[in-house]
Amino acid sequence: MLPLVRSIASDICQVFRSVIGRRADLHRIVRRGTLSAGPLYDDELAESRADLQEEYDQIWKYREEIESLGVLLRQPEEGHVEFPTVLLGREAFFSWHLGEESIRYWRSADSPATSRRLLAADDLSD
């Protein structure tokens, strides 16, 4: 399943980067609008907002797609996802970031997502 998750996470990151750029463009348009408001400004602003909404909608669709696989999207900008599991008799998550070749990290369910630990052979035996 990781190749499919990798593809979706890559798409999410790509759209997320575009959203960041588009938001910066939108802020520039809004700031510029105080100097040059008018019909062209209104059209440009409306188009930028519509494009931004499309990208948010696309991220939401990708999120639904990845979650339909039982995978949780944690940080879309980094392609960080987690796979629910049970390790050492406790609820836990396998943790993976875009760019990692395989799933090599985990965390317990009661730990923050930033507290990933390297998987060891002992972690996988009950």
Image: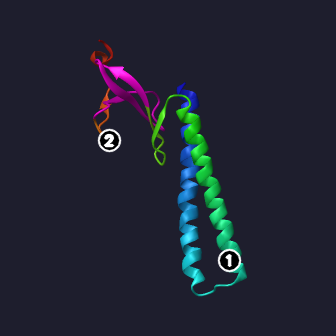
- Does 35 appear in magenta? no
Which residue occupies the extreme top position in the image? 126
Location of the N terminus by quadrant is top right
The answer to the question of whether label 2 and label 1 lie on touching residues, with beta carbons closer than 8 A, is: no
In the image, residue 60 above or below residue 103: below
Tell me where residue 64 sits by quadrant. Answer: top right
Question: Is 120 situated left or right of 57 in this image?
Answer: left
Residue 8 location, x and y as percent?
Answer: 58, 37
Of 95 and 61, the residue lying toward us: 61
Tell me where residue 104 sits by quadrant. Answer: top left
The answer, for residue 69, to whether it is visible in the render is: yes
Residue 114, numbered label? 2
Secondary structure type for disc 1: helix
- Does 87 appear in magenta? yes
- Magenta highlight: main SS: strand
- How many marks can you see? 2
Residue type, mark 1 in image: Asp
Residue type, mark 2 in image: Thr
Question: Could you tell me which residue is drawn at 58 percent across and 63 percent down?
Answer: 22
Residue 124 location, x and y as percent?
Answer: 33, 16
Q: What residue is disc 1 on?
A: 42
Question: Could you tell me which residue is drawn at 56 percent across and 45 percent down?
Answer: 12
Residues in magenta?
Answer: 83-110
Query: Dot 1, how many residues are within 10 Å of its Cα: few (below 14), some (14-19), or many (20+)?
Result: some
Lower position in the chain sequence, tag 2 or tag 1: 1
Question: Could you tell me which residue is drawn at 67 percent across and 69 percent down?
Answer: 46
